[in-house]
Image (tube, rainbow, N blue to C red):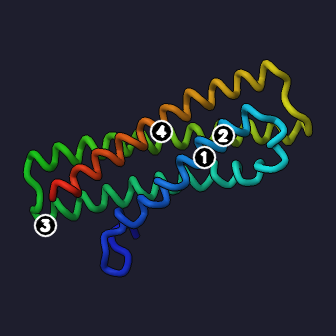
């Protein structure tokens, strides 16, 4: 399933969804946590992103692992390339887990707001905002590092 799409390796195609949806989730989660007046306007979008972004990260991760296995099977790798792929894979794994965490935290916050049917108090809002900033920052870091290591491999002809 994650090998090829129309004869092209799936990984370079699927990563684009992660590159779009994960940063949107980061921004949406922070805005939702920090500005209660936006709750009615973006609650549905943040909920969708909290589900779609982790799935996109998972698909990118699984397709990358499939691509790595194809390269190894075709003996198109050297120890140096395998080391770079392993580093990229490590960042990709972290991206997936941290994106999942941000998605779950976002869904919990949306459910909390929806259940209360009103904006949370200042303490909850500040706590949620700090949490979203911290986890969102970690996710952003791993998205950047994953993309950077992958792009370097591609543009260096690996």
> Along the polypeptide, which appears first: circle 4 or circle 2?
2
Residue at (22% x, 64% y) in the render:
70
How many residues crowd around disc 2 within 10 Å: few (fewer than 14), some, or many (20 or more)? many
Q: Name the disc covering residue 74, or none.
A: 3
Front tag of 3 and 1: 1
**Cβ atoms under marks 2 and 3 closer than 8 Å:** no
Which residue matches tag 4? 140
Q: Residue furthest top?
A: 123
Q: CA distance from mark 1 to mark 2?
A: 6 Å
Q: Is residue 63 above or below residue 1?
A: above
Of pointers 2 and 3, the one earlier in the residue sequence: 2
- Percent position (x, y) of residue 135? 55, 31
Depth-wise, is mark 2 or mark 3 nearer the camera?
2
Task: Identify the disc placed on residue 29.
Answer: 2
Q: Position of residue 10 (x, y in %)?
A: 36, 68
Label 1 sits on a secondary structure element that is: helix
Q: Which one is in front, 102 or 73?
A: 102
- How packed mark 1 is, by other alpha carbons closer than 10 Å (few <14, some 14-19, many 20 or more), is many
Secondary structure found at label 3: loop
Task: State the quadrant of the N terminus.
Answer: bottom left
Callout 1–callout 2 Cβ contact below 8 Å: yes
**Of helix, strand and loop, which one carries label 2?**
helix
Quote the CA–CA distance across marks 4 and 3.
33 Å
Q: Label 4 crowding class (10 Å Cα cut-off): few <14, some 14-19, many 20+?
A: some
Q: Are marks 3 and 1 in contact (CB under 8 Å)?
A: no
The Cα atoms of the two marked residues, 2 and 3, are separated by 42 Å
Q: Give the mark, 4 or 3, whose residue is nearer the N terminus.
A: 3
> Marks 4 and 3: CB-CB under 8 Å?
no
Instruction: Indicate the secondary structure of the residue bearing disc 4.
Output: helix
Q: Residue furthest bottom?
A: 6
Which residue is denoted by mark 1 in the rendering? Answer: 25
């Amino acid at each position: 399933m994650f090998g090829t799409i129309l004869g092209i390796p799936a990984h370079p195609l699927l990563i684009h969804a992660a590159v779009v949806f994960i940063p949107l989730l980061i921004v949406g989660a922070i805005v939702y946590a920090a500005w209660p007046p936006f709750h009615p306007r973006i609650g549905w979008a943040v909920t969708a992103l909290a589900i779609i972004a982790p799935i996109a990260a998972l698909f990118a991760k699984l397709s990358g692992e499939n691509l790595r296995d194809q390269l190894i099977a075709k003996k198109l790798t050297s120890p140096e390339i395998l080391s770079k792929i392993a580093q990229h894979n490590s960042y990709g794994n972290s991206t997936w887990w941290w994106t999942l965490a941000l998605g779950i935290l976002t869904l919990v916050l949306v459910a909390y707001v929806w259940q209360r049917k009103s904006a949370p108090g200042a303490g909850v809002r500040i706590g949620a905002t700090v949490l979203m900033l911290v986890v969102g920052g970690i996710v952003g870091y791993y998205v950047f590092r994953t993309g950077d290591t992958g792009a370097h491999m591609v543009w260096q002809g690996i």
